[in-house]
Image: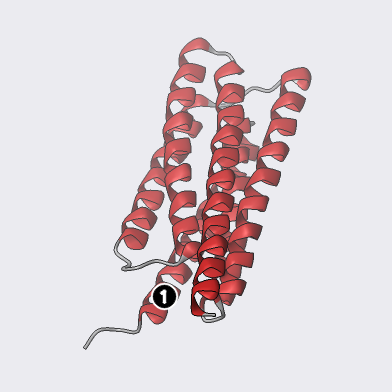
Amino acid sequence: MSKDPDERQRRTLWTVLLLNVAIAFGFFATGALGDSSALIANGLDNTSDSFVYAISLFALSRSDKWKRWAANLSGGLLLILAVGILIDAVRRYYTGSEPLGPLMISMALIAAVVNGVCIRLLGRLEDPDVNVRAANTFSINDFISNGGILVAGGLVWWLGSNWPDLVVGIAVAGVAAWGGIGILRDAHGEHHKAVHQGDAET
């Protein structure tokens, strides 16, 4: 007997939420210890993701209107996050920073494993709603960002310079902005589909 689709989505979102909270703490701790813009940026990203997963859980058993509202909020938060990361990168450019390459590499590898698990869990859900699709976008974005941190950590370690860390911090902002725009488009498409279905029924 198959489980209720909403219940499966709820359990998956809870798992992904808790994993993102844990990895956010890891990013903030290593980012502060390693003076890394890229790690702090990913910590903010995972914190934003966790907040959005909580909203998605709240909207999961509610109407499609609530689900679209939650998705719009998710996309908007990603755009705000992108601006915050850019501001932090610019600040570090002018004030200076001394990121630790080995610490960046270690954290990136751990986070990549965690985000890989999240992508696998979300990908196994059948007929995901707009918020689950948004959650999958977040996890894929995070996985891409982890690869960027890995490369930046290697360059920082090799060159003894902070510019690769700043570049990846800015790149994370770009990935977040692109993901936010994609989620907003998806929610907009769902809205138009609902309107057209309503017109067809009347």
Q: Residue at x 43, y 55 (%)?
A: 136
- Kind of residue sitting beneath label 1: Arg
User: Residue 112, image x and y in percent?
Assistant: 39, 44
Please give left or right for residue 150 compared with residue 59 in the image: left
Rendered image quadrant of residue 89:
top right
Q: Residue furthest bottom?
A: 1
Q: Residue at x 66, y 59 (%)?
A: 73
Quadrant of the frame with the C terminus: bottom right
Q: Residue at x 49, y 33 (%)?
A: 103
- Element at label 1: helix
Q: Residue at x 57, y 60 (%)?
A: 50
> Is residue 36 visible in the rendered structure shown here?
no
User: Residue 184, image x and y in percent?
Assistant: 59, 52
Q: Residues within 10 Å of mark 1 (few under 14, many from 20)?
A: few
Q: In the rendered view, tell whether residue 128 sits above or below residue 184.
A: below
Quadrant of the frame with the N terminus: bottom left
> Is residue 176 visible in the rendered structure shown here?
yes
Please state which of residues 167 and 33 is positioned toward the viewer in this rendering.
167
Q: Which residue is mark 1?
A: 11
Please give left or right for residue 115 compared with residue 156 in the image: left
Q: How many marks?
A: 1
Q: In the rendered view, tell whether residue 50 sits above or below residue 198.
A: above
Please give left or right for residue 160 compared with residue 73 in the image: left
User: Residue 31, image x and y in percent?
Assistant: 60, 38
Q: Residue furthest top?
A: 159
Q: In the rendered view, tell whether residue 11 sits above or below residue 161.
A: below
Please state which of residues 83 and 127 is positioned toward the viewer in this rendering.
127
User: Residue 72, image x and y in percent?
Assistant: 63, 58
